[in-house]
């Protein structure tokens, strides 16, 4: 019952998404070096509460290398010039959740390595979104994201070898270790099986899901050029099938 959303439910989710968009735009306008992550979080909360909404989940406001921590919630570091800010935060409106992530340069301008990683992730998200169509399998979305991310990482030398071999050996998991999305609704990770009788479920009209590829290059990784270390990028949006 919760997997296929009604017209009324879809409207509530759209409203939650709209509030979240306003919050992220407020963040982008106010973000600057010297602020703390919790001050950014306060900007988000102001927008949520001003729209009669609340947090759908504890906000992740992760600057610099903190962006490589998937469920970072300390939000107590100071934003520094030249770093990225990854913000995974969204509103819940009338019990329905949204879930949005954006990664931006704190000073308004990407460094060349940051831009390269960002564009690989954005390309992966765009191609994964195209797989969000009635009749496709749930797994098609993740497979497309993995293919695009892996190809991009090979092109810049972070993964060695041929594309098919790198995917089969899951070499991408060093930099991308989570699935590309999840169901969305009354919970931010909403209920519903992803498989039926051992087979991936087909996408049906009324399903709502997230698409959120990312690349996370821990500063402790060996064999990685310094220019890439500490870069974490995720881009997440909410899709209606």
Image: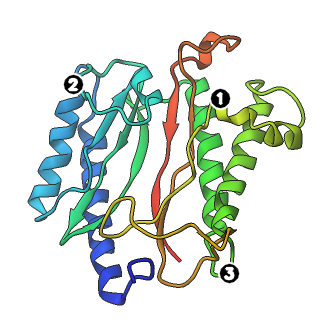
For mark 2, give the secondary structure: loop
For disc 2, the neighbor class at 10 Å (few under 14, some 14 to 19, many from 20) is many
Residue pictured at 26% horizontal, 50% vertical: 57
Q: Nearer the viewer, mark 2 or mark 3?
A: 3
Q: CA distance from mark 1 to mark 3?
A: 31 Å
Label 1 belongs to which residue?
174
Camera-side residue of 239 and 50: 239
Circles 1, 3 touching at the beta carbon (< 8 Å): no
Look at discs 2 and 1 and give the one toward the viewer.
1
Tell me, for residue 200, which label it has, or none.
Answer: none
Which residue is labeled 2 in the image? 36
Estimate the x, y position of residue 72 in percent, counting from the top left: 35, 32
Residue 194, quarter of picture: bottom right
Q: Residue at x 44, y 39 (%)?
A: 103
Residue drawn 88% across the image and 38% down it: 165
Q: Measure how far apart labels 2 and 1 are at the Cα level.
A: 29 Å
Describe the element under mark 3 as helix, strand or loop.
loop
Find numbered disc 1 in the image and state the secondary structure of the residue it sits on: helix
Residue 163 position (above or below residue 105): below
Between 175 and 21, the one nearer to me in the picture: 175
User: In the figure, is residue 207 to the left or right of 7?
Assistant: right
Q: Earlier in the sequence, mark 2 or mark 3?
A: 2
């Amino acid at each position: 019952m919760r997997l296929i959303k009604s017209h009324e439910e879809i409207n509530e989710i759209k409203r939650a998404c709209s509030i979240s968009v306003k919050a992220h735009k407020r963040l982008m306008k106010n973000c600057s070096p010297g602020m703390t992550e919790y001050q950014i979080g306060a900007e988000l909360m102001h927008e949520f509460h001003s729209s009669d909404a609340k947090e759908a989940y504890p906000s992740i406001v992760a600057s610099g290398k903190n962006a490589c921590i998937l469920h970072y919630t300390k939000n107590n570091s100071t934003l520094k010039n030249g770093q990225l800010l990854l913000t995974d935060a969204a509103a819940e409106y009338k019990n329905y959740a949204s879930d949005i992530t954006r990664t931006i340069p704190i000073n308004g301008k990407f460094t060349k390595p940051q831009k390269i990683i960002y564009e690989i992730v954005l390309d992966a998200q765009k191609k994964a979104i195209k797989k969000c169509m009635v009749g496709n399998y749930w797994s098609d979305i993740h497979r497309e994201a993995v293919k695009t991310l892996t190809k991009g990482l090979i092109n810049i030398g972070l993964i060695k070898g041929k594309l098919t071999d790198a995917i089969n050996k899951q070499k991408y998991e060093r930099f991308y270790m989570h699935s590309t999305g999840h169901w969305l609704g009354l919970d931010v990770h909403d209920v519903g099986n992803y498989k039926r009788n051992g087979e991936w479920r087909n996408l049906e009209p009324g399903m709502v899901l997230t698409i959120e590829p990312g690349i996370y290059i821990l500063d402790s990784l060996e064999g990685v050029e310094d220019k890439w270390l500490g870069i974490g990028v995720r881009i997440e949006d909410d899709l209606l099938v």
